[in-house]
Image (cartoon, rainbow, N blue to C red):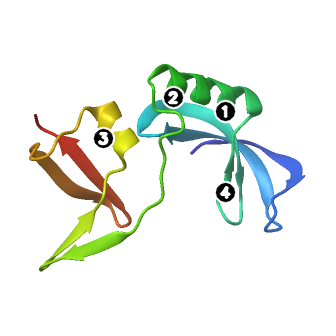
Amino acid sequence: MTSESVLDVRCKCGGRLKRSATEVEFFGIDFGTKKADVCTKCGSEYLSQELMEELEAEVKRRGLFGLERRGRVAKSGNSLVIRIPKEIADTLKMKRDLPIVIYPSEPRKLVVELEG
C-alpha cells in the first residue's frame, strides 16, 4: 500500500485516514488495485461510493449479487459438514456427488472449487 496523503478525517477508532492504493476483492472477484481511504491505526478501508457502485454492478452482471448466506458447520460421523444453500447451488449448477477440491486459502477462509 503506497501512501499518497493523510486526510483530515478520523476513523471510528480514532485513527487518521490516509489516501492509499489497496487491493480490492469482492465476492471473490479481483478488481485489482484501487484508491481507498485507509485508517492509519486499525487498517479499516473505506471505498468511495462510486467504486462501490462499480463493484456492485459487476457482481450483479455476474449473477452473484444477493447470494451471500450465513450458515453453521454441522457434524456427520467424524466429518464436519457445510450445507450449500439451494440458490448458490443452482447458480453454480452444483449437483449431488459433484467432485470438488477444498482447501484453506487464509487462516479464516475456505475455498471450494468445482471439478465437474
- What residue sits 85% from the left and 46% below the top? 7
What amino acid is found at the position of numbered circle 2 in the picture?
Val
Residue 91: x, y in percent?
34, 32
The percent coordinates of residue 86 (x first, y second) are 35, 44
Foreground disc of the pair 1, 4: 1
Residue in the picture at 30% in, 40% down: 89
The CA distance from mark 3 to mark 2 is 17 Å
The percent coordinates of residue 79 (x first, y second) are: 15, 74
Q: CA distance from mark 1 to mark 2?
A: 11 Å
Q: CA distance from mark 4 to mark 3?
A: 32 Å
Question: Quadrant location of residue 55?
Answer: top right
Which label is found at residue 59? Answer: 2
Residue, disc 4: 44
Under circle 3, the secondary element is helix
**Amino acid under disc 3:** Ala
- Cβ atoms under marks 1 and 3 closer than 8 Å: no
Residue at left 67%, top 65%?
42
Say which amino acid is labelled 4. Answer: Ser
Q: Nearer the viewer, residue 77 or 37?
A: 77
Residue highlighted by disc 3? 89
Q: Is residue 97 above or below residue 64?
A: below
Give the numbered dot on residue 52.
1
> Which is more N-terminal, label 2 or label 1?
1
Mark 1 / mark 3, whichever is N-terminal: 1
Sequence-wise first label, 3 or 2: 2
| First along the sequence among labels 4 and 3 | 4
Residue at image point 71% right, 59% down: 40
| Place of residue 30 in the rendered image (x, y in percent of width and height, measured from the top left) | 43, 33
Sequence order check: which comes first, mark 1 or mark 4? 4
